[in-house]
Image (spheres, helix red, strand yellow):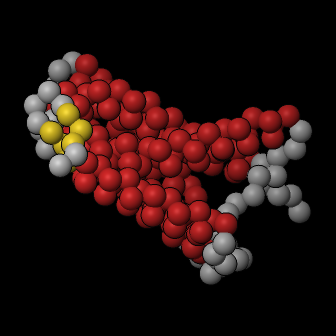
């Protein structure tokens, strides 16, 4: 049996492969939803608050991540765990809200012009690309913690934390930029 070694036990490669496969399927579904699915509510009148809710949930996830980081630095493991679960719950609620929003309204288009586009699109692209990597990293990091593989958890969390935080924060920034540069007329 092929495994990934840690200091304590071995993590079955099948678990990691399953998490990566689920993450890939989720990413492909979101790609289809954003770029190919016809929105159910083109006028955007139903549940119009969803983009703001998405930003709020991303912001709350980022806040929980930072609090969890502070807790683990202070060796408050239980508080860290509670913060990480809170961040995970906010991120999960975000994903449900994001899927609902895109199923109803489709993709929002950026209407800023000039130099601001040179900021927005690289930010958006980095946000999207890193979110694709964040999902399996978050799930594997959680699996390692929940299965007691703490040395491996710590190693992966050092990569997962900044990516998850970046994705959460840039989600709020992308929303704010979309909201500021709404189409006129």
Residue 116: % across, % down: 81, 37
For the question of whether residue 48 can be seen, the reply is no
Which residue extends farthest top?
Answer: 74
Which residue extends farthest front?
Answer: 1
Residue 25 figure quarter: bottom left
Residue at the spot 28% in from the left edge and 40% down from the top edge = 141
For the question of whether residue 121 can be seen, the reply is yes
- Using the image, determine if residue 184 lies above or below residue 62: below
Residue at the spot 44% in from the left edge and 30% down from the top edge = 162
As rendered, which of 100 and 156 lies closer to the eye?
Answer: 156
Number of marks drawn: 0
Which residue extends farthest bottom?
Answer: 40
- Using the image, determine if residue 142 lies above or below residue 89: above
Q: Give the position of the C terminus as an image quadrant.
A: bottom right
Residue 96: % across, % down: 43, 64
Residue at the spot 77% in from the left edge and 52% down from the top edge = 110
Q: Is residue 144 left or right of residue 67?
A: left
Residue 49: % across, % down: 56, 63
Residue at the spot 45% in from the left edge and 62% down from the top edge = 26
Q: Is residue 102 left or right of residue 158?
A: right
Q: Is residue 92 left or right of residue 45?
A: left
Q: Is residue 141 left or right of residue 60?
A: left
Residue 31: % across, % down: 59, 63
- Using the image, determine if residue 93 lies above or below residue 66: below
């Amino acid at each position: 049996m092929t495994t990934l070694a840690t200091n304590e036990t071995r993590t079955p490669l099948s678990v990691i492969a399953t998490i990566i496969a689920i993450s890939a399927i989720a990413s492909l579904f979101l790609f289809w939803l954003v770029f190919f699915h016809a929105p159910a509510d083109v006028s955007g009148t139903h549940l119009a608050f969803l983009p703001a809710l998405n930003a709020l949930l991303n912001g709350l996830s980022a806040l929980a991540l930072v609090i969890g980081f502070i807790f683990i630095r202070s060796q408050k493991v239980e508080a860290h765990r509670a913060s990480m679960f809170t961040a995970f719950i906010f991120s999960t609620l975000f994903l449900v809200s994001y899927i609902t929003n895109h199923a109803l309204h489709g993709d929002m288009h950026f209407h800023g012009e000039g130099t601001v586009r040179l900021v927005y699109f690289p930010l958006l692209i980095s946000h999207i690309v890193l979110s694709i990597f964040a999902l399996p990293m978050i799930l594997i990091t959680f699996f390692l913690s929940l299965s007691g593989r703490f040395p491996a958890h710590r190693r992966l969390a050092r990569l997962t934390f900044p990516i998850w935080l970046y994705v959460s924060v840039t989600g709020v920034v992308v929303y704010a930029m979309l909201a500021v540069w709404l189409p006129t007329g």
